Image (cartoon, rainbow, N blue to C red):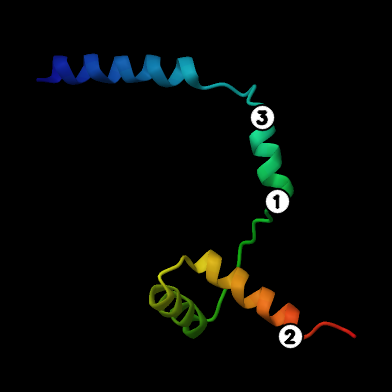
Amino acid sequence: MSKDFKAAATGADRFFSANDTKDIQDTKDTQDIKDRFYRLNLKLDIDLKDYLSDEAWRQRTSITALVNKILKEYRDNHKEE
């Protein structure tokens, strides 16, 4: 059994080392995504996290889509005139 495991591990090592490259470049598609979206790491109070999770589930959407919707509604309701 150990021979088979070692052979599999050696095969996996060749796969990962052959495909591990530091020359990764952005493609047109990844640049378009970077131009359209902003990533945000957010620390929330636990009650707000629970609210977002529950409300997203109720609306059958993702938390990201819900936060976008809430922010857009807030922006539209608080425009400076």
Disc 2 to disc 1, how far (Cα)? 23 Å
What residue do we see at 69% from left, 32% from top? Answer: 28
What residue do we see at 54% from left, 81% from top? Answer: 45
Instruction: Name the quadrant of the N terminus.
Output: top left
Q: Which residue is mark 1?
A: 36
- The nearer-to-camera label among 2 and 1 is 2
Find the residue positioned furthest to the right.
81
Q: Quadrant of residue 26?
A: top right
What residue do we see at 65% from left, 21% from top? Answer: 23
Q: Which residue is mark 3?
A: 27
32 with respect to 47 (left or right): right
Mark 2 or mark 1: whose residue is earlier in sequence: 1
Q: Position of residue 27 (x, y in %)?
A: 66, 29
Instruction: Name the quadrant of the C terminus.
Output: bottom right
Q: Quadrant of residue 69?
A: bottom right
Check disc 2 and give the amino acid type.
Asn
Secondary structure category for the residue under label 2: helix
Q: Which residue is mark 2?
A: 77
Q: Nearer the viewer, residue 77 or 18?
A: 77
Mark 2 or mark 3: whose residue is earlier in sequence: 3
Find the residue positioned furthest to the left.
1
Disc 1 to disc 3, how far (Cα)? 14 Å
Disc 2 to disc 3, how far (Cα)? 37 Å
75 with respect to 47 (left or right): right
> Crowding at label 2, few (<14), some or many (≥20) Cα neighbours within 10 Å?
few
Tell whether label 1 touches label 2 (CB within 8 Å).
no
Check disc 3 and give the amino acid type.
Thr
Mark 1 or mark 3: whose residue is earlier in sequence: 3
Secondary structure category for the residue under label 3: loop
Secondary structure category for the residue under label 1: helix
